[in-house]
Image: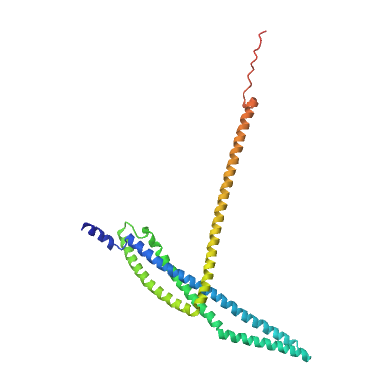
Amino acid sequence: MTGDVSEGPEKNDPLNKDIIESKIKLYEGLFYNAHQECIEKKEGLDLYYNHLHKVNSVFQTSIIFLSAGSTFMQSLTSDDQEDNKTIKIIVLSITSYSGFILALGKFLKLEDMRESVHNLRDRFADLQNKINYFIDLMEPWKNSHYYQNNISLNEKYKGTEWVSFIERIESEYVNIIDMKRELSSSYDKIIDSVVSKKYKLIYDKINSTFKQSICGCKKQTDKDKDKDKDKDKDKEKDKDKDKDKDDIESILSKKINPKETGKKPVNKSVAKKP
């Protein structure tokens, strides 16, 4: 009975450290997983958008360039019928190419796809920022000093704040999951599974290369630090050797030249009396 009575207040305490830590750990993991999924799909949309932009730019640039060339060639027409025939064939080819490219672009709906990918990418970015916002809000609650104090009024205020905060997190998490489901559905409609796997592999490759470069830079920095430490040690050893050498030379010089020590040499010969 005594055990139940003593454990009751701890369980009912809204600022129970174990409960807060478990809740924060749970929702932080859920938000982190949703955040990673948003990053992967947003990166895939970035790559796909760049691909569509390059294709559309090549089409538009080629049309502009060839149209300018066609206009220039028409201005150089002469009275020679053979030359006019050649130029007409070239101009007709350019016009046919331009019409074909424009028709192909409309058939493939490059502009519409590029616009849809751009809008979906922006929506994923908004969702990603929203998830980051709630992860940052959970950060102070990881430290027990943020909510545990000896002041009773502050404890009461923090308890109310925690209850409202966790209720908000739970409701917002449901909204985030619904939004992520909607965006993922639009993502699957725009990008098929083959293209999605392709860009996921590219993203994983870029991510692994980035991590390896960071690790390589860190290892190189550690090696440079070790080399600097070894150089400092060698310099200290050389200084100690020079100091010992100077001490030995000074001792030897004192023994060889006693006048330098300020003492006169002792004359052992005894003076004779007159």
How many labels sit on residues?
0
Q: Quick check: 211 above or below 117?
A: above
Coloration of the structure image? rainbow
* Relative depth, front residue between 165 and 90: 90
What percent of the width, then of the height, locates residue 91? 70, 88
Residue 150, picture quadrant: bottom left
- Considering every residue shown, the one lying at the far top of the view is 274
* Relative depth, front residue between 108 and 269: 108
What percent of the width, then of the height, locates residue 131? 43, 69
Quarter of the image that includes the N terminus: bottom left
- Considering every residue shown, the one lying at the far left of the view is 1
What percent of the width, then of the height, locates residue 263? 62, 23
Residue 80, picture quadrant: bottom right
Compared across the picture, whether 12 is left or right of 183 comes to left
Compared across the picture, whether 42 is left or right of 153 comes to right
Residue at (54, 75) in percent of width and height: 48
Quarter of the image that includes the C terminus: top right
Residue 27, picture quadrant: bottom left
Compared across the picture, whether 120 is left or right of 176 comes to right
* Relative depth, front residue between 134 and 21: 21
Compared across the picture, whether 17 is left or right of 205 comes to left
What percent of the width, then of the height, locates residue 39? 48, 70
Residue at (68, 87) in percent of width and height: 93
Residue at (62, 86) in percent of width and height: 100
